[in-house]
Image: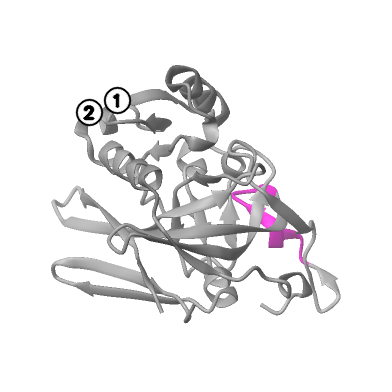
């Protein structure tokens, strides 16, 4: 069962009351599959607070990744859920694509791993376009265990993959 | 998730990293930590190649096209990353 190291990135802030704090985000090193079959790089972070993954417009359109639509409307108990496929106020299609995960220390790439995601139909401001999000469904769909260890020195983490 | 569309899955395999994949990651790590890059290109996509920004801008397609012209490489073979505060709290 290979473990894929996460790239824990921190940014230091300070409040107007001179309180210092450090914020973290867990990036995975990933490759998406382009329409011509080549693997293309695009930033992605793991966010278990997101129920679905998110593929920004700049990724699926700009890097021309291979994906398949799964629908444009969500239903629950037979009733439509209009806000279910919005991202930052932009309408999305639900779709599926594949990624590969990289671990530089182990010198390996694993994949393909299935990603069910919201595919944004429009470009958003750059700060939002810069990264894809790997949500809870990504962990569940691929039997991946997310491990994060925090202590005074910082946070480290990895994705534990099922036996291959 | 037990959607029928997920029933047919390609077997997941482990591959050794290629030199190109490793170089791309090293270039991106350089871009994300270089003080000059962080100041100069905030809010933009950048294409780092051999520790040099070969193209930058807000439109990823234009940036990749420019980088392909500069380097002579296919856009798919170029790394790209966003230079931004990655810690904005984004609702889902």
User: Where residue B61 sits in the image (x, y, percent)?
Assistant: 57, 28
Which of these two is toward me, B37 or B26? B26
Q: Assess whether residue A20 is covered by the magenta stretch.
A: no
The colouring scheme, among rainbow, by chain, secondary structure or one colour, is one colour
Of residues A97 and A17, the one nearer the viewer is: A97
* Measured Cα–Cα span from mark 2 to mark 1: 6 Å
Residue marked by disc 1: B40
The answer to the question of whether label 2 and label 1 lie on touching residues, with beta carbons closer than 8 A, is yes
**In the displayed structure, does residue A74 sit left or right of residue B51?**
right
In the image, residue A94 above or below residue A150:
above
Q: Image point 34% across, 47% down: which residue?
A: B22
User: Would you say A28 lies left or right of B75 here?
Assistant: left
Is label 2 in a helix, a strand or a loop? helix
Q: Chain of mark 2?
A: B
Residue under the point 22% across and 50% down:
A13
Q: Position of residue A107 (x, y in %)?
A: 33, 59
Indicate which disc residue B36 carries: 2
| Image quadrant assignment for residue B34 | top left
Counting other residues with Cα less than 10 Å from the Cα at mark 1, is it few (<14), some (14-19), or many (20 or more)?
A: few
User: In percent of the image, x 34 and y 63: which residue is there?
Assistant: A6
């Amino acid at each position: 069962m290979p473990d894929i190291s996460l790239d824990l990135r921190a940014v230091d802030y300070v409040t107007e009351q001179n309180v210092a704090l450090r914020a973290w985000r867990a990036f995975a090193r990933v490759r998406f599959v382009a329409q011509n079959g080549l693997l293309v790089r695009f930033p992605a972070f793991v966010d278990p607070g997101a129920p679905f993954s998110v593929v920004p417009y700049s990724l699926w359109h700009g890097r021309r990744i291979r994906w398949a639509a799964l629908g444009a409307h969500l239903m629950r108990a037979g009733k439509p859920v209009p806000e279910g496929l919005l991202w930052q106020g932009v309408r999305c299609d639900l779709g599926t694509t594949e990624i590969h995960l990289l671990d530089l220390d182990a010198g390996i790439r694993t994949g393909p791993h299935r990603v069910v995601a919201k595919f944004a139909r429009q470009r958003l401001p750059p700060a939002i376009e810069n990264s894809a999000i790997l949500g809870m469904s990504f962990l569940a769909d691929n039997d991946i265990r997310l491990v994060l260890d925090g202590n005074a020195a910082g946070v480290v983490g990895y994705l534990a993959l099922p036996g291959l | 998730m037990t959607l029928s569309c997920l029933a047919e899955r390609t077997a997941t395999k482990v591959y050794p990293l290629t030199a190109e994949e490793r170089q791309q990651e090293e270039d991106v790590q350089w871009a994300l930590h270089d003080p000059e890059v962080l100041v100069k290109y905030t809010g933009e996509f950048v294409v780092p190649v051999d520790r040099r920004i070969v193209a930058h801008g807000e439109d990823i397609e234009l940036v990749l096209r420019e980088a392909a012209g500069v380097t002579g490489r296919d856009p798919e073979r170029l790394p790209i990353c966003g230079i931004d505060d990655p810690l904005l709290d984004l609702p889902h």
